[in-house]
């Protein structure tokens, strides 16, 4: 009886060891695959990485379009060159304030 139990226990232990080896191989294979994918696929940055990603592409396009329209209007409607340059510089200086007031999401 005791030899029979010892044989069954040895068989169970051998099966458990075989299962453990299979799990370790699968884990190692997954780790290698993940490492390969990490090397091949570029990292994706989450969150804001600078000033520009704060606004969507459409908002940025609108900001640029309206700024160019204002510069064009200044250039067409103002006769004096010095006044044109001064107004355009003033517009570019005040533009960040206008954008924050218009598009701030607080």
Image (cartoon, rainbow, N blue to C red):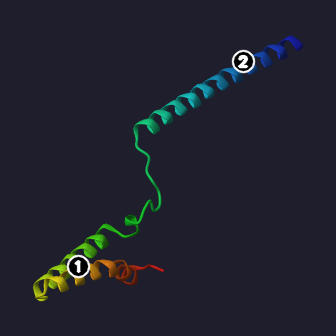
Task: Categorize mark 2 by other alpha carbons within 10 Å: few (<14), some (14-19), many (20+).
Answer: few
In percent of width and height, residue 86 lies at 23, 83
Q: Which numbered disc flags the more N-terminal residue, 2 or 1?
A: 2
Q: Nearer the viewer, residue 83 or 38?
A: 83
Q: Nearer the viewer, residue 53 or 17?
A: 53
Task: Categorize mark 1 by other alpha carbons within 10 Å: few (<14), some (14-19), many (20+).
Answer: few
Residue ID for mark 2? 14
Q: Residue at x 62, y 27 (%)?
A: 24
Asked whether the viewer can see residue 43, the reply is yes
Q: Secondary structure at mark 1?
A: helix
Rendered view: 45 above or below 10: below
Which residue is the extreme one toward the right? 2
Asked whether the viewer can see residue 1, the reply is no
Q: Which mark is residue 66?
A: 1
In percent of width and height, residue 28 lies at 57, 28
Q: Give the image quarter of residue 10.
A: top right
Q: Secondary structure at mark 2?
A: helix
In percent of width and height, residue 16 lies at 71, 24
**Disc 2 to disc 1, C-alpha distance:** 75 Å
Which residue is the extreme one toward the front? 82
In percent of width and height, residue 13 lies at 75, 20
Pair 2/1: label in front: 1
């Amino acid at each position: 009886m005791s030899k029979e139990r010892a044989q069954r226990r040895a068989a169970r232990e051998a099966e458990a060891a075989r299962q453990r080896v299979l799990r370790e191989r699968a884990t190692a294979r997954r780790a290698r695959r993940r490492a390969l994918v990490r090397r091949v696929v570029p990292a994706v940055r989450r969150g804001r990485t600078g000033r520009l990603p704060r606004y969507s592409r459409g908002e940025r396009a609108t900001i640029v379009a309206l700024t160019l329209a204002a510069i064009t209007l200044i250039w067409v409607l103002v006769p004096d060159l010095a006044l044109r340059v001064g107004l355009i510089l003033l517009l570019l200086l005040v533009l960040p304030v206008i954008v924050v007031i218009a598009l701030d999401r607080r």
